[in-house]
Image: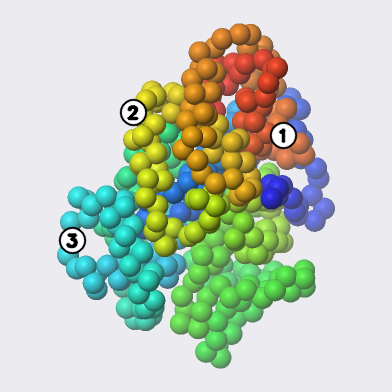
Amino acid sequence: MQTSLQATSAPGRAGLPDADAVPPGAARPRVLLAPITVTPSKPLTPSHLKGLLWADVLYRATAQLAEVTYRYSPTTYHLTEQTLGFWEHLDRTVGDTDYSVLTEEEIGELYVGYRSEGRRAGAAALRPYAEAVELHGWVHPASARILQRWAAHYARLGMHDAGLLAHQPPELGLEEVIDRLGTVGMCLDQRAYGGPVFLDATRYGLPLRQIVDARGRPNYLACALRELVALAPRFDETVLLYDRELEPDYLLLERTLSVCGATVRRITLGRVPIDGQIRSARHGDWHDHTAGALLSRAGAEYDDAVLRLGMRLYFVAGLGPGQRQSFRHGALRQSLARAARLLSHEGATDPAPLPEVLARHRSAHLHVNPYRLTSGLLARHRLAPSPELLSAVYL
């Protein structure tokens, strides 16, 4: 599978200049990076790490050429039934528990149990949780524990933390975004008749998509719309990064944001197979493939600089945008060894200024392509990357 880098611009909008063509002293272009968020209910798996490291390289590289806002708000997506249902399940089946002493894997096993239960909580049972999130920024202790552990992994990997532990509510309320969608002719609201709310892009050849059910519960796409409908049009480019299973929803999201005046780029990533199979984290079976396990294993042999660069070499360049290659511990070790050699700074390094080096890995868009940039580090018969590049983007 190839990376999708398609753009949809607001009608009549002029072409955007290349970042390296902006005159000195002029305002730099503004880029919004909005990757898919991971539900805080389980340990980070190789598929999660792949998406997060792609986003991190994109953010840090593009920030050298543009003003980049990295929007990653767990708060926005706590309102999905997937998350609220898990919290209700924990309180109903586990009760009062000190989650601060549990590992990610132990909480993840509770999540696997929730998904296997197959029971959907009623609207009345979920309403207090939704109100606590919306009104008070409350997070269930189990998810708070998961987010704390993720923040520690981010720090170990040198990844930019855009607010894992922060309360970051979306700009628009649910009613506000439904009203805005109705204004631009993108909404079919049947609540007056006891029905759901649909995102309606049928005039663009896209199917109707329910975003709020008949009980008033929003899904992930509704939460993304609350987040981005008002925000994205303020930027020169919005980059959506997500896994291929969500392609239909992100085609709808791209079209909706473009109708609202945004210029959108989509980057589609394949998940990482384990032993040749792609399985959702809801099924468990993560064994020694969690972020914590990988960091512990690699950290016993390599220092943090090698760990940070090597993980990016493997998950960005080694696995690439598709999903044909299964995760292999041996391949990760090879990337770590390659990182150690690159950090030794043996041989001549690229003398070009950092903005020039980064601008080579953009085409008609404003953001730096993380795959092209990182693959270039592995190319034979090329000058070694400069310490400035490694420090700014990979360490």
Q: Is residue 173 above or below residue 244?
A: below
Q: Nearer the viewer, residue 99 or 292?
A: 292
Disc 1, SS? loop
Q: CA distance from mark 1 to mark 3?
A: 49 Å
Q: Which badge, 3 or 2, comes first in the chain's sequence?
A: 3
**Relative to 310, 267 lies left or right:** right
What residue sits 65% from the left and 64% below the top? 248
User: In this view of the protein, can residue 69 be seen by the observer?
Assistant: no
Three-letter residue code for mark 2: Ala
Q: CA distance from mark 1 to mark 2?
A: 36 Å
Disc 3, SS? loop
Residue 331 in percent (x, y) is at 52, 34
**Relative to 232, 116 lies left or right:** left
Q: CA distance from mark 3 to mark 2?
A: 32 Å
User: Badge 3: how crowded within 10 Å, few (<14), some, or many (20+)?
Assistant: few
Q: Nearer the viewer, residue 169 or 44?
A: 44
Residue receiving disc 2? 300
Residue 49 in percent (x, y) is at 48, 44
Three-letter residue code for mark 1: Arg
Residue receiving disc 3? 97
Q: Is residue 281 above or below residue 151?
A: below
Residue receiving disc 1? 362
Which residue, as the protein is rendered here, is positioned at the far top? Answer: 347
Q: Is residue 107 above or below residue 32?
A: below
Disc 2, SS? loop
Q: Which badge, 1 or 3, comes first in the chain's sequence?
A: 3
User: Badge 2: how crowded within 10 Å, few (<14), some, or many (20+)?
Assistant: few
Three-letter residue code for mark 3: Thr
**Relative to 75, 328 lies left or right:** right
